Amino acid sequence: MASPTDPPVTKLPSPCVSICQMDPQDGVCLGCYRTRAEIAAWRSMDQDDQLQLLEILKDRRAKVTGVRRRPSRRNTKRLSV
């Protein structure tokens, strides 16, 4: 049980897009590009691990579809005017 002084744990929504079909050749879901192990582990991952997996999934999707991914704005500093 979490103590009252622990910061709240923030979980990200699942990357599932309800197209649940595993590619028999590489074992990756054709909808979200996760492996079975990654799908099973999602709920037990902390937010940092989830964010890291999302970056991996973007690369996987780009490799399969040929669509270049946009750079993430999460780690960039914004300019103040």
Image: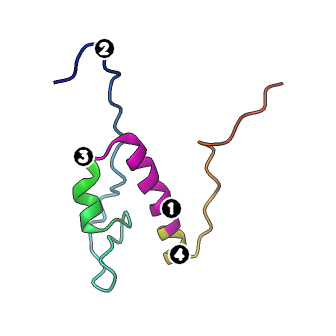
Identify the residue position indicated by label 3 in the image. Answer: 44
Identify the residue position indicated by label 2 in the image. Answer: 5
Among numbered discs 4 and 2, the one appearing first in the sequence: 2
State the CA–CA distance, disc 1 to disc 2. Answer: 35 Å
The residue positioned 21% from the left and 22% from the top of the image is: 2
Q: Which residues are magenta?
A: 43-59
Quarter where residue 71 is shown: bottom right
Identify whether 48 is placed above or below 31: above
Residue 45 within the magenta-colored segment of the rendering = yes
| Number of the front mark, 4 or 3 | 3
Q: Which mark is residue 58?
A: 1
Among numbered discs 1 and 2, the one appearing first in the sequence: 2
The residue positioned 84% from the left and 24% from the top of the image is: 81
Quarter where residue 41 is shown: bottom left
| Crowd tier of the residue under label 2, counting other residues whose Cα lies within 10 Å: few below 14, some 14–19, many 20 or above | few
Identify the secondary structure beneath mark 4.
helix
Q: Going by the picture, which residue comes out furthest to the left?
A: 1
Residue 39 image position (x, y, % from top left)? 26, 59
Question: Which residue is nearer to you in this view: 50 or 14?
Answer: 50
Residue 20 image position (x, y, % from top left)? 27, 66
Among numbered discs 1 and 4, the one appearing first in the sequence: 1
Among numbered discs 2 and 3, the one appearing first in the sequence: 2
The residue positioned 24% from the left and 67% from the top of the image is: 36
| Crowd tier of the residue under label 4, counting other residues whose Cα lies within 10 Å: few below 14, some 14–19, many 20 or above | few
Can you say which quadrant of the picture contains the N terminus?
top left
- Specify the amino acid type for callout 3: Ser
